[in-house]
Image: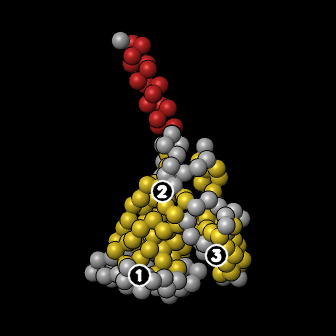
Amino acid sequence: MKKLSLLVVVVLLLVEGALANPTAQRWTPGWDNFSVPLNYKASELTWSVNSANKTMSVTYKLVGAVPNSFYGAGVLIFCSTFPATFGQFPTSFVSGGDCTSFTRQGVTKTAAGALFGVITTDIHGNGSFSVVVGPIAAGSYDLEFAVIDTGGSLCGDNGTDFQSPGPIWGDGTTITIP
């Protein structure tokens, strides 16, 4: 029985090591739209990597945004080349494997993008969206999380309202998938 208990403890420690604690980041104004309402102190993005499953969990939380609206929740991955998918999501801004060059806030970088889903806000402008992305190919990724203005509908892209980490386009967060 002692061997079984010891085995359970070892397995729990291995699993615990594979599941990183969530990292919380604040939103900053996006690289396209700088005056969209948001309670920046109460809004946040949290993410974590599960090494064992090669996944990334992300939660987008908006407080005090535009009421009764839709926002796209996604990520920009800074790269020179990138595959057709990031986890289970198709990538955009990739042509023949090459990432697209963008200039925002006076900074030029090449990037690929992935749209994960939609944040729907209530009558107070509050909303959230959670997603598990993966499996993700092993590697180190420099990325910036983004909330895109859909213009109040499920269609369209009227620019990026919020970025994290920011405050400048290209200020990335590095995640590593073993």
Q: Viewed as shown, does residue 143 lie left or right of 18?
A: right
Name which residue lies at 51% across and 76% down.
162
Q: Viewed as shown, does residue 40 lie left or right of 82?
A: left
Q: SS at mark 1?
A: loop
Q: Amino acid at mark 3?
A: Ile
How much space separates mark 3 and mark 2, taking CA atoms?
28 Å
Q: Residues within 10 Å of mark 2 (few under 14, many from 20)?
A: some
Q: Nearer the viewer, residue 161 or 150?
A: 150
Marks 1 and 2 close (CB-CB < 8 Å): no
Residue at label 2? 88
Q: Amino acid at mark 1?
A: Cys
Name which residue lies at 41% across and 76% down.
71
Residue 163 in view (yes/no): yes
8 to 126, vertically: above or below: above
Image depth: mark 1 or mark 3 in front = 1
Q: Amino acid at mark 2?
A: Gln
Residue at label 1? 155
Name which residue lies at 36% across and 67% down.
128
Name which residue lies at 63% across and 69% down.
94
Q: Earlier in the sequence, mark 1 or mark 3?
A: 1
